[in-house]
Amino acid sequence: MKIRVFVSLKDGVLDPQGKAVEHALHSLGFKGASDVRISRVVDLHVKADNAEEAKAKGAEMARALLANEVIEDFHVEVAG
Amino acid sequence: MKTGIVVFPGTNRERDMAQAFRVVSGKAPQMLWHQQDNVDGLDLIVLPGGFSFGDYLRSGAMAAHSPIMQAVRRFAEKGGYVLGVCNGFQILTEAQMLPGALLRNAGMRFLSQDCHLKVEGRDSIFTSGWKHGDVFRAPMAHGDGNYTAAPDMLDRLEGEGRVAFRYCTAEGHVKDSDEHVNMNGSARSIAGVLSENRRVCGLMPHPENLTEEILGGTDGLPLFTGIMEALG
């Protein structure tokens, strides 16, 4: 089953990359762009009988390696 | 004192670190490959700088789960001494052997220059070579050195004397919001921290690169003489 793990910095954690991209957007004329945050998406296949099991496996992997819960939040979606 | 230096694919400061220990002890540390899981007989394990596993995913994340880190964790749990410098510090936070995390530098630039550090840690072999409040110069070379931790953890580290080193001016002034002093934007200018039992220490700058006159100075030497005096 294909799942998608979204990893993003927690609210309040500074994102220098997002800031730099925001500045670049402003200089390109996108003056309304704000609160730019860069996240990571990890696509993978897992062996699972149903969506619940697939999501649970994704969450386990996120906690073990894919996300650093000191600074990042994650959520898992079944991609079909 | 028996020292082991861990080498991951992408580690590049292991020889600088070995040379610093050779200068103070006359003995060459043992190199430990990341796939081995036995660290018996050592007094100190050092995780040196570099770009382990190409900094993939997050700096230090892959290395933190390698076989040797299981052994390093058991070694530390039994009271062993562990020092992590630069990428080694990132690995220790990713392995949750030290609190907090190291984010991208606030200014987005890779910083390769000298900085000054103030010695603040208490009751630790990693700071015992200096007097409390001493200031010394150290080279830094990192892209992800912006230390962060939850505010209550930062309070705890400060309250327990576990902030080992802070970025400061040459005169010893700490200026959290001055990008020329706290160059990577670290929370409360923290450059290095100690574990609860004070036997695990991580710091971003490289004292090992200023340990002989031929390198431009010996400002970093007290880190190694302090360790040497404590562990023999």
Image (cartoon, grey):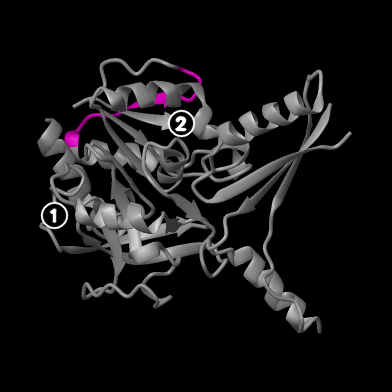
Residue A4 in view, yes or no: yes
Residue A38 lies left or right of residue B24; in this view the side is right
The image quarter containing residue A18 is bottom right
Q: Are marks 1 and 2 in contact (CB under 8 Å)?
A: no
Q: Residues within 10 Å of mark 1 (few under 14, many from 20)?
A: many
> Whole-percent x and y of residue B43?
23, 25
Q: Same chain for the residues at labels 1 and 2, yes or no? A: yes
Given residues B160 and B78, the one toward you in this image is B160
Amino acid type, label 2: Val
Given residues B30 and A23, the one toward you in this image is A23
Residues rendered magenta in the picture: B25-36
Residue A61 lies left or right of residue B177; in this view the side is right
Query: Which residue lies most toward the right here?
Result: A80
**Would you name the residue on which mark 2 appears?**
B7
Image quadrant occupied by the C terminus of chain B: top left
Q: Chain of mark 2?
A: B
> Whole-percent x and y of residue A38?
68, 59
Residue at 52 percent across and 26 percent down: it is: B66
- Residue A57 colored magenta? no
Above or below, B17 relative to B219: above
Given residues B17 and B185, the one toward you in this image is B185
**Would you name the residue on which mark 1 appears?**
B130
Given residues B61 and B32, the one toward you in this image is B61
Tag count:
2
